[in-house]
Image: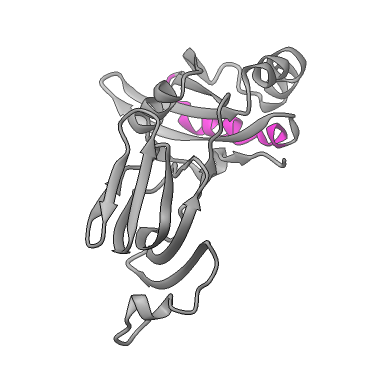
Amino acid sequence: MDRKTSLLELTKEVTEKHANFSVSEVNDHCMRIAVLEGEYVWHFHPGSDELFIVLEGELLIDFQDRPTEVLKANDSLLIPKGVIHRTRADVRSVNLCIEKTNAETVPFAEGNVLKLIRCKPAGQQLHAFSEAQAKWAPLQNVSGFIRQWGGWMETENGPEALVLVLWKSKRDYLNFMADHHDAIYERTNQKGTFESINITLFEEPAEISKTLQNNTPAPVPEWTVKGSG
């Protein structure tokens, strides 16, 4: 879009209850038009904030850890990365959304659990740990696995690796730990690359949303694994 454009004119011919299309890009960010009548799925964006600007109608945004926000025409709301949310509209709503061009949408459903792993690398073995962490790709074929991602975060005690893993259910996670974890771990050669590890499993949606918001490390793309199902 390199000329004057009426965003509402672009949506006059849209008859679908849910339509989403890009209208422009600026400085590695994408501007999208989202037309909505009804509900969109619960989801979050692990690597990008998202700005909503309502152009027409009324947009409701639900959260797992705070009350619903009601946005009317000309209202805006910034949703930080990691915040679990759902958009809905009782009548047709036209919205401008701005987020990173490469932003990913990760669905979230009732019963999902989040595993948070914090590792302190041994000595100066950041590269060795990172190489090993990139070998968890077999996760993609494990039943119930949704997504793994992470990166480095600076702490008072030096760099720390943060890895987040989303599972469809606690049962899927426990089955993975019993049947697949040790075999995959052995093949990564990760043993010896870290001196301490802390693992927490979050089951409540509000806790998961808070954890996602508070743990946004500098991403290492090679650590990202996406489920196949």
Q: What's the colour scheme?
A: one colour
In the rendered image, residue 124 lying in the magenta stretch gets the answer: yes
- Residue 152 image point, x, y percent: 40, 33
Height in image: 227 above or below 28?
above
Q: Residue at x 66, y 31 (%)?
A: 145
Q: Residue at x 48, y 26 (%)?
A: 125
Q: Nearer the viewer, residue 158 or 15?
A: 15
Q: How many marks?
A: 0
Q: Which residues are magenta?
A: 123-140
Main SS, magenta region, reads helix
Q: Which quadrant of the rendered structure holds the C terminus?
A: top right
Left or right: 131 as drawn, with respect to 183: left
- Residue 95 image point, x, y percent: 36, 62
- Residue 52 image point, x, y percent: 32, 55
Q: Residue at x 42, y 52 (%)?
A: 90
Q: Which quadrant of the rendered structure holds the N terminus?
A: bottom left
The quadrant in which residue 96 appears is bottom left
Q: Nearer the viewer, residue 130 or 219?
A: 219
Height in image: 33 above or below 52?
below
Q: Residue furthest bottom?
A: 3
- Residue 37 image point, x, y percent: 47, 57
Q: Nearer the viewer, residue 226 or 95?
A: 95
The quadrant in which residue 228 appears is top right
Q: Nearer the viewer, residue 124 or 168?
A: 168
Height in image: 179 above or below 70?
above
